[in-house]
């Protein structure tokens, strides 16, 4: 009797069954596209190159000079101490300045600059291989670890078997 009751409840309407399967595959496709989009973000962003070490050092020394002048204006340090500290900071700047000028470095205030657009083919090839590899790996794992060959069971029957 139990099987008759169950068969009366199940829908053998191919339109409903096909629609549910289509909705399932549509949801799977959307989740795959979302995952691939998140994986592709680093490839789509423009890479920024940072200012050179020498340019960064010069910016730090300029900030130290500004702070030194502020401390002198507030009366935190004496004029003699300020002159000695200023001289030391300027010596450090001179030590770094030839290397920064020789490298053609931009001042650190300019911040990060866009990197050249080279290797575009590599970026697109990487995105394409990710686009193919992620779904293929997911389907392979499902085929190996899942049970695609088993027929589906009603929830109540699977719950009874679990108990």
Image (spheres, helix red, strand yellow):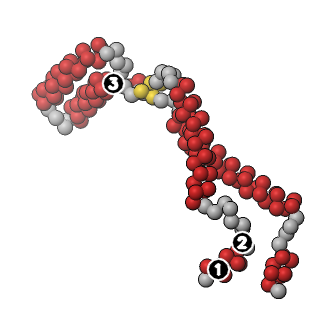
The answer to whether mark 2 and mark 1 are in CB contact below 8 A is yes
Residue drawn at the location 50% of the way across and 21% of the way down: 118
Rendered location of residue 14, percent (x, y): 86, 61
Residue 149 seen in render: yes
Residue drawn at the location 26% of the way across and 17% of the way down: 99
Closer to us: mark 3 or mark 2? 2
- CA distance separating discs 2 and 1: 11 Å
- First in sequence: mark 3 or mark 2? 3
Label 3 sits on residue: 52
Rendered location of residue 157, percent (x, y): 70, 78
Tell me where residue 160 sits by quadrant.
Answer: bottom right
- First in sequence: mark 3 or mark 1? 3
Furthest residue in direction bottom, as rendered: 1
Label 2 sits on residue: 153
Tell me where residue 67 sits by quadrant.
Answer: top left
* Left or right of 72, for residue 116: right
Furthest residue in direction front, as rendered: 149
Residue drawn at the location 16% of the way across and 35% of the way down: 77
* In the rendered image, the vertical position of residue 98 relative to residue 40, given as above or below: above
The answer to whether mark 3 and mark 1 are in CB contact below 8 A is no
Label 1 sits on residue: 161
- Judged from the image, the secondary structure of the residue bearing numbered disc 1 is helix
* Left or right of 109, for residue 10: right
Label 2: how many Cα within 10 Å (few below 14, some 14–19, many 20+): few
């Amino acid at each position: 009797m139990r099987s008759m009751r169950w068969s009366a409840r199940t829908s053998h309407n191919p339109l409903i069954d096909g629609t549910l399967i289509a909705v399932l595959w549509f949801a799977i496709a959307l989740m795959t596209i979302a995952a691939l989009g998140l994986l592709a973000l680093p490839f789509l962003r423009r890479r920024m190159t940072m200012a050179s070490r020498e340019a960064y050092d010069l910016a730090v020394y300029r900030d130290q000079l500004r702070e030194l002048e502020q401390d002198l204006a507030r009366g935190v340090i004496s004029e003699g101490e300020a002159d000695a500290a200023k001289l030391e900071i300027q010596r450090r700047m001179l030590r770094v300045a030839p290397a920064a000028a020789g490298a053609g470095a931009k001042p650190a205030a300019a911040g990060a600059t866009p990197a050249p657009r080279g290797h575009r083919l590599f970026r697109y090839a990487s995105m394409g291989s990710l686009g193919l590899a992620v779904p293929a790996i997911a389907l392979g794992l499902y085929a190996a670890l899942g049970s695609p060959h088993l027929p589906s069971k009603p929830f109540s029957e699977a719950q009874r078997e679990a108990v």
